[in-house]
Image (tube, rainbow, N blue to C red):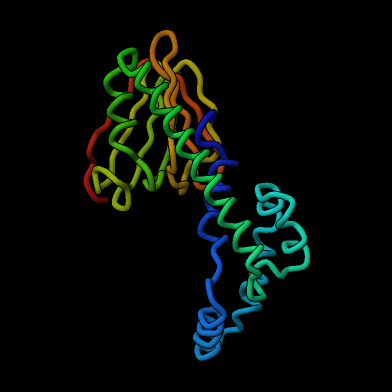
């Protein structure tokens, strides 16, 4: 993946996480709500930071690292400085992501006319959040995927995706993975598809064409 990488996805997950209460009253209200539900809010937030520790240290600037290491990033009422740094980081992130999206859109527009119509359809009728039920080669140059699209953006039922004229394929375990984001490249004789999966592995396939068949609910 060149655009929608594992690192890109991980950073995206931090945007909603790095949000803090604006006032002490709001902070106390949140704590009180969880206490009334029998939940130790501070312990929950500490565990949440710990579970994301590697990702937080990788993607956030050095300013945040002491808060991450000592577990106080989300377990004490945030200082004005911490809130401001988080705000600046989110603004920087949003600017970078807008630039990345525009870059990919410009690239895709430049190659769209070179792509098989099946590849264009596959990409533009997004399979985001579809669940991969199975993946198998039915011939040396044919790969078939079956997906449950009931929670996806299109089709809303089970489909079969058949790649024909397969020249190359890099396939991790696909079954029960979720299709997150994909990007296309134009190559001699067809197209290259790269897909970021819910495991944050990716698969890549170069093929001459692709077709989509509606199967209906199993």
Counting from the top left corner in percent of width and height, residue 218 is at 27, 51
Above/below status of 6 relative to 36: above
Q: Toward the viewer: 32 or 21?
A: 21
Q: Quadrant of residue 45?
A: bottom right
Count the numbered circles shown.
Answer: 0
Q: Toward the viewer: 6 or 166?
A: 6
Q: Quadrant of the N terminus?
A: top right
Apparent side of residue 94 relative to residue 83 in the rendered image (left or right) = left
Apparent side of residue 54 relative to residue 216 in the rendered image (left or right) = right
Counting from the top left corner in percent of width and height, residue 137 is at 44, 28
Outermost residue, top side: 188
User: Which residue shows up at 65% across the image and 58% down it?
Assistant: 52
Q: Quadrant of residue 41?
A: bottom right
User: Which residue shows up at 24% across the image and 50% down it?
Assistant: 217
Apparent side of residue 53 relative to residue 92 in the rendered image (left or right) = right
Counting from the top left corner in percent of width and height, residue 180 is at 44, 43
Q: Toward the viewer: 81 or 104?
A: 81
User: Which residue shows up at 27% across the image and 20% down it?
Assistant: 117
User: Which residue shows up at 77% across the image and 61% down it?
Assistant: 66
Q: Toward the viewer: 24 or 11?
A: 24
Above/below status of 110 relative to 22: above
């Amino acid at each position: 993946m060149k655009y929608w990488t594992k690192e890109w996805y991980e950073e995206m997950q931090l945007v909603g996480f790095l949000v803090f209460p604006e006032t002490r009253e709001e902070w106390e209200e949140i704590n009180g709500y969880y206490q009334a539900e029998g939940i130790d809010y501070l312990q929950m937030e500490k565990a949440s930071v710990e579970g994301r520790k590697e990702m937080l240290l990788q993607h956030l600037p050095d300013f945040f690292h002491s808060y991450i290491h000592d577990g106080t990033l989300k377990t004490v009422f945030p200082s004005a400085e911490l809130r401001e740094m988080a705000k600046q980081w989110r603004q920087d992130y949003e600017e970078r992501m807008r630039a990345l999206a525009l870059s990919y859109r410009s690239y895709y527009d430049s190659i769209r006319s070179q792509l098989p119509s099946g590849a264009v359809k596959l990409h533009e009728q997004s399979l985001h959040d579809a669940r991969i039920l199975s993946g198998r080669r039915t011939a040396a140059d044919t790969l078939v995927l079956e997906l449950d699209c009931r929670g996806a953006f299109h089709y809303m039922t089970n489909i079969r995706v058949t790649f024909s004229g397969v020249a190359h394929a890099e396939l991790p375990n696909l079954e029960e993975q979720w299709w997150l984001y994909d990007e296309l490249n134009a190559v001699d004789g067809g197209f290259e598809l790269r897909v970021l999966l819910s495991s944050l592995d990716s698969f890549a396939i170069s093929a001459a064409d692709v077709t989509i068949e509606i199967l209906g609910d199993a």
